[in-house]
């Protein structure tokens, strides 16, 4: 069972110091704290690290007597102290606004607000403990109606949950247009020289209309076409009809103009087993096939 004598933030700084030190003995002594914090015995630490039991015992005693700041300072890893619970709460509120793009900016805020200096890796450890991750922002359509999306979700979720998969099937449909073209990127080259990359002649793209099963996402049907239009849509829906000869088929789709084309509307009026359901305008986030 884990001992857990290190505060979670202390544990982060010990691991950071251990990862950054080039001194073998410092690495061993920092590892002592990590392994003891995991609940290993001093005897086990001694055997696994290849150091004497006395060294393990002295490391723990020095931590207990001096605290982490002096222990880390002794082992080549300056430690500036930890934030109070209130300061951590303030930091969490600040970063939750989603306005910081790097750890240097957060470190500057901490120093200005709390008077505590952290390295970027130290900030990274704190943010990880607070549950933050570093990820790309997600673009959402500016015309989306949040209230309409919420209303639609309240209807869609129970609808999907109540589907009888023996007699009904639900698909989410959309088109994608992969493009094959060379793009320049950055590389290291000698000053004054260039790195040339041959491009393909002209731009190439393909048009794929696809439908993904809401309950079995590995079940995907696609149709490749010169243009995604009413005819390409009809071809895809025909595939679904032929695949599910005994089931009623519900297909969720966006509001592309070709779905309202007279030809596709006439076609949809004939096979009674298939029903096209439109998502709210500007709502790709509600279309499950977008994940694919």
Image (cartoon, helix red, strand yellow):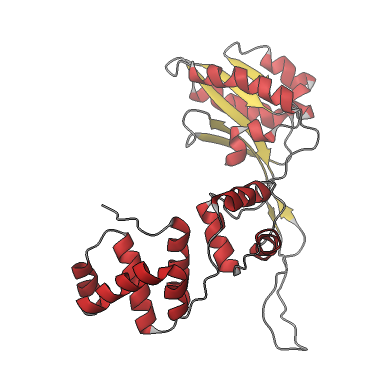
**Viewed as shown, does residue 267 lie left or right of 214?**
right
- Residue 155 seen in render: yes
Q: Quadrant of residue 175?
A: top right
Which residue is drawn at the image coordinates 79% and 28% (left, top)?
A: 257
Residue 79's x, y, as percent? 52, 71
Residue 291's x, y, as percent? 58, 40
Count of marks, rendered view: 0
Which residue is drawn at the image coordinates 50% and 53% (left, top)?
A: 129
Furthest residue toward front: 65
Residue 18's x, y, as percent? 42, 73
Q: Quadrant of residue 195?
A: bottom right
Tell me: residue 55, above or below residue 246.
below
Which residue is drawn at the image coordinates 60% and 67% (left, top)?
A: 118
Which residue is drawn at the image coordinates 53% and 65% (left, top)?
A: 81
- Residue 245 seen in render: no
Tell me: residue 154, above or below residue 61.
above
Residue 245's x, y, as percent? 49, 18
The quadrant the C terminus occupies is top right
Q: Quadrant of residue 107?
A: bottom right
Q: Work out whether residue 22 or residue 43 is closer to the camera in this orientation and state it.
A: 43
Q: Work out whether residue 54 or residue 131 is closer to the camera in this orientation and state it.
A: 54
């Amino acid at each position: 069972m884990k001992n857990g004598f290190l505060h979670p933030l202390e544990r982060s700084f010990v691991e950071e110091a251990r990862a950054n030190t080039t001194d073998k003995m410092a690495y061993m002594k920092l590892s002592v704290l990590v392994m003891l914090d995991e609940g290993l015995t001093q005897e086990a630490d001694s055997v696994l690290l290849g150091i004497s039991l006395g060294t393990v015992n002295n490391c723990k005693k020095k931590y207990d007597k001096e605290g982490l700041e002096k222990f880390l300072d002794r082992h080549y890893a300056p430690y500036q102290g930890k934030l109070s619970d209130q300061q951590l709460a303030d930091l969490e509120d600040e970063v939750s606004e989603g306005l910081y793009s790097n750890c240097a900016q957060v470190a500057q805020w901490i120093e200005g607000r709390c008077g505590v200096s952290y390295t970027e890796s130290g900030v990274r450890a704190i943010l990880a403990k607070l549950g933050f991750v570093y990820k790309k922002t997600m673009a959402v359509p500016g015309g989306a109606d949040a209230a309409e999306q919420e209303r639609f979700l309240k209807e869609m979720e129970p609808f999907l949950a109540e589907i009888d998969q023996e007699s009904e099937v639900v698909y989410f449909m959309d088109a994608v247009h992969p493009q094959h073209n060379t793009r320049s990127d950055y590389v290291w080259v000698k000053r004054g020289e260039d790195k040339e990359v041959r491009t393909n002649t002209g731009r190439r793209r393909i048009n794929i209309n696809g439908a993904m099963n809401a309950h079995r996402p590995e079940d995907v049907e696609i149709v490749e076409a010169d243009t995604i239009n009413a005819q390409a849509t009809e071809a895809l829906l025909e595939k679904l009809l032929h695949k599910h000869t005994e089931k009623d088929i519900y297909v969720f789709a966006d509001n592309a103009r070709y779905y309202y084309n007279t030809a596709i509307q006439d076609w949809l009026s004939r096979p009674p087993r298939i029903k096209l359901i439109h998502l709210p305008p500007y709502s790709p986030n509600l279309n499950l096939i977008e994940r694919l």
